[in-house]
Image (spheres, helix red, strand yellow):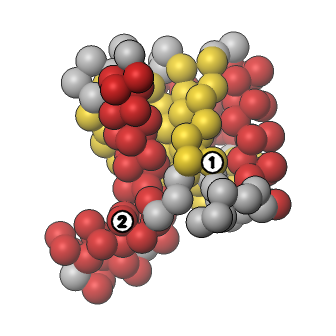
């Protein structure tokens, strides 16, 4: 059962694919976006290729738990995908995933790995999905 995960951003949206059975996630690509609206051809191709059972969208909130403007845009993005592809969408708190993604990329590739915003976004999407799987496994 494949699952697509998204790290929403205004200019770039990281995408990862995961397998619910193995609880693993793999970074895929970054989809270009314009004011948070993704490239439709890229999105359609991802859904066609991976045929996910559901989707997970990172939900950006402040460290104190308050919402920000990006929180509302991410929710709108996820709901639009759910409506378009007729799938269930789950939103996962994404606090600190970008920092964790940068740390992982740096440890593997050094500073040159951090030059790619798209790579950071995709690794963040994979981390969001792995955290979602872990939380789901614990809660049953």
User: Where on the picture, by quarter, is residue 42?
Assistant: top right
- On screen, residue 93 above or below 108: above
Query: Is residue 68 found left or right of 106 in the rendered image?
Result: right
Place of residue 103 in the rendered image (x, y in percent of width and height, measured from the top left): 30, 72
Is residue 46 at all visible to an observer of this figure?
A: no
Task: Write the residue at 40% across / 33% down.
Answer: 135
User: Where on the picture, by quarter, is residue 68?
Assistant: bottom right
Say which mark, if any, is on residue 91: none
Q: Within 10 angstroms of label 1, few (less than 14), some, or many (20 or more) residues? A: many
Instruction: Report the front residue among 52 and 98.
Output: 98
- On screen, residue 79 above or below 57: above
Place of residue 129 in the rendered image (x, y in percent of width and height, measured from the top left): 42, 39
Q: Residue furthest left?
A: 108
Say which mark, if any, is on residue 59: 1
Task: Write the residue at 76% across / 21% down.
Answer: 83
Residue that numbered label 2 is attached to: 100
Q: Earlier in the sequence, mark 1 or mark 2?
A: 1
- Quarter of the image that includes the C terminus: top left
- On screen, residue 109 above or below 11: below
Instruction: Report the front residue among 59 and 28.
Output: 59
Task: Write the residue at 29% across / 83% down.
Answer: 112
Judged from the image, the secondary structure of the residue bearing numbered disc 2 is helix
- On screen, residue 89 above or below 11: above
Is residue 62 at all visible to an observer of this figure?
A: yes
Place of residue 98 in the rendered image (x, y in percent of width and height, measured from the top left): 46, 65
């Amino acid at each position: 059962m494949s699952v697509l995960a998204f790290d929403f951003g205004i200019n770039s949206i990281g995408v990862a694919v995961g397998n619910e059975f193995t609880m693993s996630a793999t970074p895929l690509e970054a989809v270009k976006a314009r004011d948070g609206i993704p490239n439709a051809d890229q999105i359609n191709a991802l859904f066609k290729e991976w045929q996910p059972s559901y989707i997970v969208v990172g939900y950006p909130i402040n460290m104190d738990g308050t919402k920000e403007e990006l929180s509302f845009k991410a929710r709108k993005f996820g709901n639009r995908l759910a409506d378009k592809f007729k799938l269930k969408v789950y939103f996962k708190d994404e606090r600190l995933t970008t920092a964790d993604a940068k740390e992982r990329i740096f440890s593997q590739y050094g500073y040159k790995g951090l030059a790619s915003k798209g790579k950071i976004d995709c690794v963040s999407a994979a981390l969001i999905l792995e955290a979602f799987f872990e939380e789901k496994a614990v809660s049953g």
